[in-house]
Image (cartoon, rainbow, N blue to C red):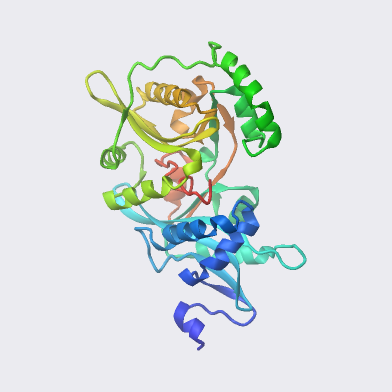
């Protein structure tokens, strides 16, 4: 047996094969990111390497039985699938989940990617020891690959919502004409004037919130998440894991400060809470929005007003099925993307996603990750 086989426990032959990703592979993985997404350059390479190490090798749920995977060919890493193990609870019992991310395959000299390498990586991941497999930022190609390997689409959670606050700026952001576009920079003064007028329209202006949101720390957020009820499947955190998760989510400086706030009534009772990026002039990403059924309207109104005061062009997040009617009342626009995909040994776990019986926010999948945002 070769030294490589002894070290990884995977059968990697001269032609190629899949093995566990090692820290030494991250240079190759970073190069794959640059090739695949085109948003990383030499200046950001060190930051990317540090982030990948933190996400895939230093997370509090690390488990050698569920490593990130690489496809190696002729001694080079040509494919990657990131894996972050997670803990969840199903009807009070702890279960092992694993979130896949950043499936990438290197282009050949002819400019083509070998689809069989992506299939092999996905099949290996889905055959892992985890009780539940998840991904929640999937595009159409990943959806076809996942379902072709026996996975399922969680249609109830595969919708995102956008609440325009600056309508014209929102349209430009959704159309890909952000600050990096020369035409957008030239048009910015005109856009600001138009949006200022549109923002005063009664149909778009949020109502004055009845209750003022308050900033909360991670300990309080943990208590709120642990108080969630009414779902068969819920996330399982302790203070160490949630602090790590918040710290990772905060490593997206271009999106602004990560705000964690709860809303209380006049008697001090918590009505709900939200976590989002205070993004000025762009789409502000909402990672978590939760509240009691009778009070979520107040929580959502507080969030919209909060984001408008911060100068966001719009709010966007994944739709929690139980809140869809309230989001609709808030003049939100819905999109059938990105795909949330699941697979489980126990079909009851898949049913939780099919029947909207899972508390599944942006923290439980990939939406918190800088490399998937």
Q: Residue 247: horizontal and vertical position, in percent?
A: 37, 48
In the image, residue 176 sits, relative to residue 301, either above or below, namely below
Q: Residue 170: horizontal and vertical position, in percent?
A: 60, 28
Residue at the (30%, 39%) spot, across then down: 221
Q: Nearer the viewer, residue 68 or 345?
A: 68
Residue at the (57%, 30%) spot, across then down: 334
In the image, farthest residue toward the right: 110
Left or right placement of residue 268 versus residue 169 in this view: left
Left or right placement of residue 182 versus residue 373 in this view: right
Q: Residue 307: horizontal and vertical position, in percent?
A: 46, 27
Q: Nearer the viewer, residue 20 or 145?
A: 20
Asked whether the viewer can see residue 22, the reply is no
In the image, farthest residue toward the top: 202
In the image, farthest residue toward the bottom: 1
Q: Nearer the viewer, residue 6 or 249?
A: 249
Left or right placement of residue 52 versus residue 299 in this view: right
Q: Quadrant of residue 97?
A: bottom left
Q: How many marks?
A: 0
Residue at the (59%, 34%) spot, across then down: 335
């Amino acid at each position: 047996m070769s030294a490589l086989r002894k070290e990884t426990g995977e059968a990697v032959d001269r032609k190629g094969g899949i093995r566990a990703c090692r820290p030494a592979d991250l240079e190759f993985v970073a190069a794959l990111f640059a090739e695949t997404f085109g948003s990383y350059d030499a200046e950001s390479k060190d930051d990317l390497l540090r982030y990948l190490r933190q996400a895939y090798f230093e997370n509090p749920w690390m488990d050698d039985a569920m490593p990130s995977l690489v496809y190696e060919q002729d001694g080079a890493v040509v494919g990657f699938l990131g894996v972050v193990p997670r803990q969840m609870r199903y009807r009070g019992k702890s279960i092992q989940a694993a979130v896949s991310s950043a499936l990438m395959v290197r282009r050949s000299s002819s400019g083509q990617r070998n689809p069989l390498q992506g299939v092999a990586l996905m099949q290996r991941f889905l055959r892992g020891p985890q009780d539940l497999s998840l991904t929640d930022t999937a595009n159409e190609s990943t959806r076809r690959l996942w379902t072709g390997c026996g996975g399922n689409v969680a249609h109830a959670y595969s919708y995102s919502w956008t609440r325009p606050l600056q309508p014209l700026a929102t349209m430009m952001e959704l159309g890909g004409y952000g600050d990096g576009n020369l035409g957008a920079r030239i048009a910015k003064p005109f856009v600001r004037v138009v949006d200022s007028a549109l923002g005063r329209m009664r149909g778009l202006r949020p109502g004055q919130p009845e209750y003022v949101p308050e900033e909360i720390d991670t300990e309080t957020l943990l208590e709120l998440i642990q108080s969630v009820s009414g779902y068969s499947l819920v996330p399982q955190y302790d203070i160490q894991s949630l602090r790590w998760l918040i710290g990772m989510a905060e490593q997206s400086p271009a999106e602004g400060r990560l705000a964690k706030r709860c809303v209380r009534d006049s008697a001090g009772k918590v009505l709900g809470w939200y976590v989002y990026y205070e993004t000025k002039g762009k789409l502000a990403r909402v990672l978590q929005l939760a509240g009691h059924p009778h009070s979520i309207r107040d929580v959502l109104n507080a969030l919209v007003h909060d984001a408008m005061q911060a100068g966001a062009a719009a709010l966007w997040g994944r739709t929690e099925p139980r809140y869809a009617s309230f989001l609709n009342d808030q003049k939100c626009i819905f999109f059938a993307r990105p795909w949330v995909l699941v697979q489980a040994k126990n079909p009851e776990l898949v049913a939780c996603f099919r029947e909207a019986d899972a508390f599944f926010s942006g923290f439980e999948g990939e939406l918190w990750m800088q490399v998937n945002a």
